[in-house]
Image: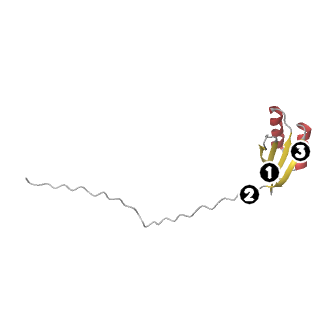
Amino acid sequence: MQQKIVVKVSMNGDKKTRKALKIVVGISGVESASFVGSDKDQIAVTGEGIDSVELTSLLRKKVGYTELVSVGPVEAKKEEPKPIVQVDPYHYYYHSYGVPYYYVSPY
């Protein structure tokens, strides 16, 4: 079952941001990672079989202060059913514009 983990990381520079993302993507089972939050200081990780404690401790060692915000299942997006359109294959629309007639007179 897929899970979603949100981790808050104190990243002061662009270098630490890239480093944190590289660490997160390197963990086995991670399918996607993205920055979320108002200041983009949180990383949302989705995948299967991810150890949230291992993720948090790795980020603490390599990047700095890290806080585990939430762990939970991935919310499935519900797609709205598309309306069924039935086409009558025996009903055709023909536009006849008429055929011009020419008369040849012997005069």
Task: Confirm whether residue 41 shows in the render.
Answer: yes
- Give the camera-side residue of 16 and 49: 16
Q: Farthest residue toward the front?
A: 38
Q: Label 2: state its secondary structure.
A: loop
Image mark for residue 76: 2
Look at 88% across and 49% down and name the residue there.
52
**Mark 3 or mark 2: whose residue is earlier in sequence:** 3
Q: Is residue 50 left or right of residue 107?
A: right
The label shown at residue 13 is none
**Which residue was labeled with disc 1?**
47
The image quarter containing residue 104 is bottom left
Name the amino acid, label 2: Ala
Say left or right for 105 vs 76: left
The alpha-carbon separation of the residues under discs 1 and 3 comes to 19 Å
**Is residue 49 visible from the viewing direction of this image?**
no
Q: What percent of the width, then of the height, locates residue 32?
A: 77, 47
Q: Which residue is mark 3?
A: 67
Q: Amino acid at mark 1?
A: Gly
Q: Say which label, 2 or 1, has the lower sequence index.
A: 1
Determine the CA span between mark 2 and mark 1. 13 Å
State which tag comes first along the sequence, 1 or 3: 1
The residue sitting at 86% across, 38% down in the picture is 10
SS at circle 1:
strand
